[in-house]
């Protein structure tokens, strides 16, 4: 709980910092997501109160932009690039294989909270297509066959 | 100033960083220190070299030796052999296909670079983007100084107008005209905006410019500010580009420190400063009105034009908005003049254009060519053609707003108007090559899937129309297409183009229309014959074992659902009802005996 209180304190500080800036809502929400890992409803309420905007406005922004998560993500976030260059080189098959291996649908987090699978737009590493990232680590030129071995390294 | 006998340039663009160039830089610095060479050799992390396919890339000057696909294990050899003893590590040198001069050629003579003209990318892969002194050494901020001390605001706009520079973000609107509109407005506040929300899948030109030469964009924005009477700028950049964001922030801080941003720039009384705003993953925010709404902190929904941004833009004030590549051209144009710029490219589209070349192509990477260069030159001479001896089928330009161009149009010169005439568009510069294994109906479905997901939902034609088109395409690739589906697609496409609110919706049907135009037979094969000519759509194919089968049982063992049966040395058979089309048998078969039909 103490940890949570600390996080809220940090959030309040950020809200104070940005209070008078024009167009401050998104930067504050982005920093809030850095702190909490996501922007759940109570964080949204705190932001709305702090900046003097309605909760519906905050919620509207949170649900409009794909980067804002309302729920926490898994320990490992697997992002498979479905940009055009990766797609024509078979990244859909890679994504399908990951979902099959983990028994979790794309966009969801596995029941044990270990993995979140997401399809992402071009990350710009088209030279390595097809590409996926697991947290900050980039795996390039992968095929569906490589998937079990790669996932194995994180499963321990 | 310290003088080094040798410079080692290591690419620190996103592509090479993803394949481990950070480790190479660390190892290189460590090795150089151990060998006591740290006062003789300087390691520089640069922006993108362009040839991402063979990354990580390392270039050693003054020789100009181009090392490709370097691993951290190779670093010791490069340091010990090349840097210490002057012996080039031949096995790592990049050579053109079929070229046996293993000492390598100078950069400018390599096929990939030979046909290129670099203006927007001129400093990418040349300077350290995190060091303002290097930018200044390459004529950086000279154009700003020239504008502020020798030119009137009208004079600046005049040069940009005469140069014929057109917006590189896709629309191709003349930049000078935009600046003039914004300058003509009377207001207490105006804004200069840089659109770095490069959302087209398969496009990474703007990211590379920001990563490799961020000061060029900052300088251009300040010049634009001077010309239109603005003292404040915003760069709206994708949050998915962490390296670009970091370097941009460093560059802005450096420019402030040098007095090139802030109050009273160069003692001329001109004030200008720049803020960075991060996107949050919404493609529609690349549309200029949506982008401005997003900077204001709201849902990035476009608003109708007019009023245009030049009249009523960010926070309701007159604003000029250009994309990264457009700005990157500006300092050079101001220094070298409009006539110089017009010597490149075509009458209607002067200058150069950067393309992100990807997909089924040998040399994936970033290329900059004069406008008017034929597609064939980019794909075959620079791109090195299609890998694995496959046949070229189409090149997709313009991302979700563009179209697929077939082989018989490869000699069309690349410029804004000629691409529009053949049903595609320049777009921001993504160029994705497809071969005979790509199904064009599936590609159309892929782009519609993208637009449906990214539609902001504000206007009905885009929100509902694109969804209906996607549903039709989905049933076609599943083999459930109906005879009048093509006609329905065309009717929907026409209405959406005519009625959607913003550019995203108005251009969303383009991938469908262009594939229908050039590859109609593929749609017809899916709908009428229930066949996918490219053997991509799983619902429309099954696997067969041919007479090439030697009966080795490898496929029997690898099949996860026991769909293959057969005795040793006898031809096997597949139970197509059981088969899940995972293709693991095809990969396992050493005799190419299993085929998709």
Image (cartoon, rainbow, N blue to C red):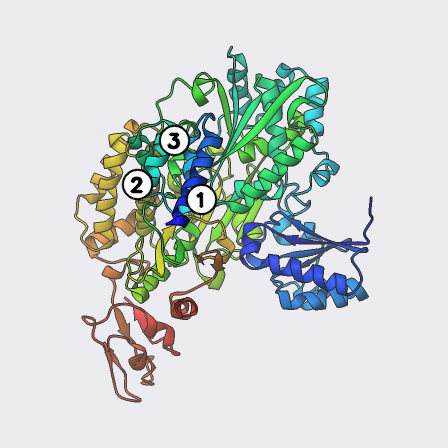
Q: Which mark is residue A50?
A: 3
Q: In x, y percent, where is residue B584?
A: 34, 72
Query: Circle 3 sits in a helix, a strand or a loop, which is it?
Result: helix
Same subunit, tags 2 and 1: no
Q: Chain of mark 3?
A: A
Tell me the CA gap for discs 2 and 3.
14 Å
Residue B5 vertical placement versus B562 (above, below): above
Instruction: Pick whichever of labels 2 and 3 is earlier in the sequence.
Output: 2
Q: In x, y percent, where is residue B347?
A: 57, 28
Q: Is residue B313 visible?
A: no
Q: Nearer the viewer, residue B154 or B518?
A: B154
Query: Circle 2 sits in a helix, a strand or a loop, which is it?
Result: helix
The residue at 29%/41% (across/down) is: B452
Residue A141 vertical placement versus B283 (above, below): below
- Judged left or right of residue B224, residue B269 is right
Which residue has dot 2 on it? A41
Mark in the foreground, 1 or 3: 3
Query: Circle 1 sits in a helix, a strand or a loop, which is it?
Result: helix
Quadrant of the rendering where the C terminus of chain B is positioned: bottom left
Looking at the image, how many numbered discs can be counted on the residues?
A: 3
Quadrant of the rendering where the N terminus of chain B is positioned: top right
Which residue has dot 1 on it? B409
The residue at 45%/51% (across/down) is: B433
For the view shown, which residue lies furthest in the top direction? B186
């Amino acid at each position: 709980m103490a940890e949570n209180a600390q996080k809220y304190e940090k959030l309040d500080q950020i809200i104070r910092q940005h209070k008078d800036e024009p167009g401050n809502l998104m930067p504050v929400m982005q920093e809030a997501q850095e702190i909490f890992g996501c922007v759940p409803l109570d964080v949204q309420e705190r932001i709305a109160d702090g900046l003097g905007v309605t909760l519906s406005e905050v919620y509207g922004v949170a649900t409009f932009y794909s980067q804002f998560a309302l729920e926490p993500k898994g320990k490992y976030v697997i992002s498979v690039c479905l940009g055009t260059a990766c797609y024509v080189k078979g990244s859909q098959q890679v994504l399908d294989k990951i979902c099959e291996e983990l028994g979790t649908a794309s966009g969801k987090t596995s029941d044990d909270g270990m993995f979140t699978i997401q399809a992402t737009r071009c990350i710009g590493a088209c030279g390595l297509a097809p590409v996926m990232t697991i947290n900050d680590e980039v795996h390039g030129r992968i095929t569906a066959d490589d998937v079990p071995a790669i996932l194995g390294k994180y499963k321990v | 100033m310290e003088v080094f006998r040798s410079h080692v340039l290591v690419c620190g663009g996103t592509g090479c960083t993803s394949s481990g160039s950070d480790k190479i830089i660390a190892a290189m610095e460590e090795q150089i220190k151990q060998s006591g060479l740290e006062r003789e050799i300087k390691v520089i992390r640069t922006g993108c070299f362009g040839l991402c396919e063979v990354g990580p890339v390392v270039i050693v000057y003054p020789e100009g030796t181009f090392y490709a696909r370097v691993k951290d294990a190779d670093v010791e050899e490069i340091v010990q052999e090349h840097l210490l003893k002057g012996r080039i590590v031949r096995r790592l040198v990049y050579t053109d296909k079929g070229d046996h001069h293993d000492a390598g050629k100078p950069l400018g003579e390599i096929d990939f670079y030979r046909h290129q003209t670099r203006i927007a990318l001129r400093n990418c892969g040349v300077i350290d983007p995190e060091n303002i002194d290097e930018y200044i050494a390459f004529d950086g901020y000279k154009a700003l100084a020239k504008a502020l001390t020798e030119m009137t605001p009208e004079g600046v706009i005049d040069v940009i107008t005469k140069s014929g520079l057109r917006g590189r973000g896709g629309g191709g609107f003349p930049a000078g005209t935009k600046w003039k509109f914004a300058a003509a407005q009377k207001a207490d506040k105006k804004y200069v905006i840089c659109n770095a929300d490069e959302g087209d899948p398969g496009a990474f030109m703007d990211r590379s410019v920001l990563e490799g030469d961020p000061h060029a964009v900052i300088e251009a924005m300040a010049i634009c500010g001077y010309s239109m009477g603005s003292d404040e700028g915003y760069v709206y950049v994708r949050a998915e580009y962490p390296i670009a964001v970091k370097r941009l922030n460093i560059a802005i801080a450096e420019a402030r420190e040098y007095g090139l941003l802030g109050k009273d720039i160069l003692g001329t009384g001109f004030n200008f400063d720049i803020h960075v705003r991060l996107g949050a993953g919404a493609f529609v925010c690349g549309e200029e009105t949506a982008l401005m709404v997003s900077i204001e902190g709201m849902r990035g929904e476009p608003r109708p034009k007019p009023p245009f941004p030049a009249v009523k833009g960010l926070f309701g004030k007159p604003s000029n908005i250009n994309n990264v590549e457009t700005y990157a051209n500006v300092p050079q144009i101001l220094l070298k003049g409009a006539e110089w710029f017009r010597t490149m490219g075509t009458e209607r589209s002067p200058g150069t254009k950067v393309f992100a070349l990807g997909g089924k192509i040998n040399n994936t990477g970033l290329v900059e060519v004069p406008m008017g260069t034929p597609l064939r030159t980019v794909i075959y001479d620079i791109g090195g053609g299609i890998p694995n001896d496959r046949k070229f089928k189409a090149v997709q330009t313009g991302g979700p707003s563009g179209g697929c161009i077939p082989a018989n149009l490869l000699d069309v010169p690349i410029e804004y108007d000629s691409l529009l005439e053949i049903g595609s568009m320049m777009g921001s510069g993504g160029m994705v090559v497809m071969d005979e294994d790509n199904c064009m109906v599936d590609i159309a479905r892929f782009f519609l899937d993208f637009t449906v997901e990214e539609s902001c939902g504000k206007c009905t034609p885009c929100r509902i129309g694109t969804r209906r088109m996607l549903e039709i395409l989905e049933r076609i690739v599943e083999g459930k297409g109906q005879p009048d589906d093509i006609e329905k697609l065309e009717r929907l496409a026409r209405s959406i183009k005519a009625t959607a609110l913003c550019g995203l919706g108005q251009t969303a049907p383009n991938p469908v229309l262009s594939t229908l135009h050039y590859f109609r037979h593929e749609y017809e094969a899916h709908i009428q014959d229930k066949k996918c000519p490219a053997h991509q759509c799983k619902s429309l194919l099954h696997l067969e074992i041919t007479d090439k089968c030697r009966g080795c049982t490898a496929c029997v063992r690898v099949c996860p659902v026991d769909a293959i049966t057969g005795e040793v040395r006898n031809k096997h058979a597949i139970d197509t009802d059981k088969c899940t089309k995972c293709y693991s048998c095809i990969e396992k078969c050493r005799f190419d005996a299993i085929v998709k039909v």
